[in-house]
Amino acid sequence: MKREINLLTLTYLLVLLSLFISGAFEGILSTVIYILGFVLPFCLALALAKIPGEKRRAEYLTLSGSGAIITANTLFLLVGICFVLSYLSALLLRYTLGVSQDVALGDSFAMAVILHALLPAVLEEALFRYLPIKLIGERSPTVTLLLSAGFFALLHHSFFQIPYALVAGLIFMAVDLMCGSVLPSLILHFSNNLISLVWTFFIEGTPLALPFFISIAALGAFSAILAVIFWKKLYRERVNRIFVIGEKYEAGAYPLLFALPTLFIAVTELFI
């Protein structure tokens, strides 16, 4: 497994270098270098791995032998923490330095969705979720989590974004390992990018992210309700296949914790 870890580390360093180079250019050339900076290291890593036909995936994940687990109960709370960190990062960026991170999006919303929502989600999920699962996967979920999330955070190269990106990377990878697929994190990543894009295009000039965080709070409450309805059945059917502490339990109302941090953010925004 040491070889796979070294290969992943080298791949991520190449990606960071290519992104640094792409920042020195503008226009279509910068976009091309950006895309190739993901695609070429990704293909190189797969070619050097030489594991044809072997699947490395874990349907359910234990973080350590001590029994700390990620289940449906704790996942929503982690997502809430993720949004809190995002909110605090935005506050620090705005009120400490008085600046915001503006990106040239152009006039076409459809093109912006492709270039700034879909493309980054696909490239980053392939590199930071699919590749680690393919190379390491269930042999060491802890290494898979920490290595991918650490470099995913560094990819954002901003002191204010790194804490959020680190937690988001951990959550995305944990979800994928539990589901045995990168599709969940791809959907989450694209949705996050799309919401931010809609906010930038259509809600610019409003108080700091107020509509954004209110919508997230509503989405959290809705998701929690669905979780309570559907995951009770899921836990009854699969609880024997999940590592748990103590007695068997069901999701119950615990996913409602997801809504609390985001509702807090939305309410406090009214007084800022």
Image (tube, rainbow, N blue to C red):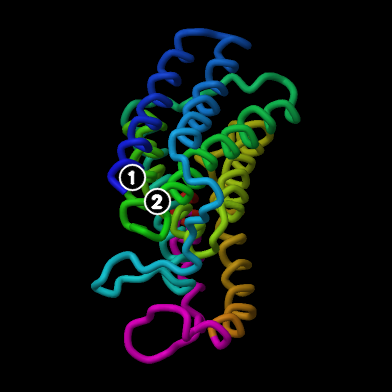
Choose top left, top right, bottom left or bottom right for residue 245.
Answer: bottom left
Task: Please say whether residue 272 is visible from this viewpoint.
Answer: no
Please name the residue shown 38% across and 45% down the image. Answer: 149
Which x, y percent locates residue 153? 37, 38
Q: Nearer the viewer, residue 5 or 251?
A: 5
Report which residue position mark 1 lands on: 147
**Residue 243 is a magenta residue:** yes
How packed is label 2: few (under 14 Cα within 10 Å), some, or many (20 or more)? many
Q: Which residues are magenta?
A: 236-265
**Residue 57 appears at what percent x and percent y?**
49, 59
For marks 2 and 1, give the CA distance. Answer: 11 Å
Q: Nearer the viewer, residue 171 or 204?
A: 171
Is residue 178 something that shows in the picture?
yes
Q: Nearer the viewer, residue 3 or 19?
A: 3
Q: Which residue is mark 2?
A: 136
* Quarter of the rendering containing residue 202: top right
Secondary structure of the residue carrying numbered label 1: helix
Q: Hey, what amino acid is under mark 2? A: Ile
